[in-house]
Image (tube, rainbow, N blue to C red):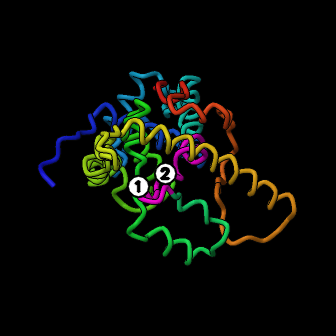
Amino acid sequence: MGSRHFVITEEQKKEYAAGILLDLMQKEGVSFSVVLSGGDCDLEPLFVHMMAKDYIDIDEENCYHMTAKGLEKLDNLKKRYEEYLAHFDLYCAVDLEKGEFAFDKIFDMDDDEWDDYLSQERFDDIRIAIAWFKKINPTDFVFLSFLKEGQFNLNHEGWQFELLSGLIWEQMEEIVDTAITVEDLSYTDDTGERILGEAVLEDILRQGASLNEKLHGQEANLSQDDNEYPNDFYDDQQEPYIVTTYESYYDPYYISPIWFIY
């Protein structure tokens, strides 16, 4: 596998962690005094960063509170999460040999069957390659995937320390470092012509956009008919954010500007 070379910078960690903490402050109404105590003392470098970025300020009761800029950052995180689920998550399982997406069968199975189906060896996760191709920071995809899976647990002792210094960041680095790359998707066809990974991804992205639109349409129809169905293609409990049209994603080179804010 070789030695790790991909590194998440301390600045990036603090930006990701700031989003998690801002969400905790807004959603759960958690308040932090400027005089930190107990495990919260480990959050001091993060609060210093957030103050410097103007995400938070200090109120009359000497507690941190979110600023307008902090609300903008949190809103952007929610939009990225929505965009990730709506347009990129289905690339987690693609049969590159047959050109098939596992998500094409998502409404045909119950949860256990779906989990077994996704784990088939024939499916490859190409989300990181998609990120590189789109010129999106690949750790954004891993971070959002971890959020979806509940990997950032803030309900146990010591979570404050782990938020910036835990092994979870090394796990994210390893995922990026060992993922399929754009170059890995290159191949030589039957005529001896070399097909570059970029061309492969262009085709996959167009197929994915078409499947995405079809699946969202199917789920909307099932929901309107009040039918019971075994699986959700898109299951988000948060306030919905519509950040782009499906048509935009038929262009493999389309990149939403939300990925370049904060």
The residue identified by callout 2 is 91
The part of the image, by quadrant, that contains residue 234 is: bottom right
Residue 122 in the image: x percent, y percent? 40, 66
Contact? badges 1 and 2 (CB < 8 Å): yes
Residue at the location (40% across, 30% down)? 135
Which tag, 1 or 2, sits closer to the chain's start?
Answer: 2
- Residue 181 visible in the snapshot: yes
Query: Crowding at label 1, few (<14), some or many (≥20) Cα neighbours within 10 Å?
Result: some
State the residue in front, 161 or 194. Answer: 194
Q: Is residue 138 above or below residue 2?
A: above
The amino acid on which the numbered mark 2 sits, given as a three-letter code, is: Tyr
Residue at the location (40% across, 50% down)? 126
The residue segment tinted magenta is 82-99
Quarter of the C terminus within the rendering? top left
Q: In this view, does 76 lie above or below 92?
A: above
The part of the image, by quadrant, that contains residue 105 is: bottom right
Q: Distance between the residues labelled 1 and 2?
A: 6 Å
Give the numbered dot on residue 174.
none
The amino acid on which the numbered mark 1 sits, given as a three-letter code, is: Asp
Secondary element at image label 2? helix
Q: How many marks?
A: 2
Secondary element at image label 1? loop
Taking the image as shown, residue 77 lies to the left or right of residue 229, namely: left
State the residue in front, 85 or 156. Answer: 85
Quarter of the N terminus within the rendering? bottom left
Residue 191 in the image: x percent, y percent? 33, 45
Residue at the location (68% across, 54% down)? 215
Residue 164 on the magenta span: no
The residue identified by callout 1 is 125
State the residue in front, 148 or 181. Answer: 181
Taking the image as shown, residue 188 lies to the left or right of residue 230, namely: left
In this view, the residue farthest toward the left is: 3
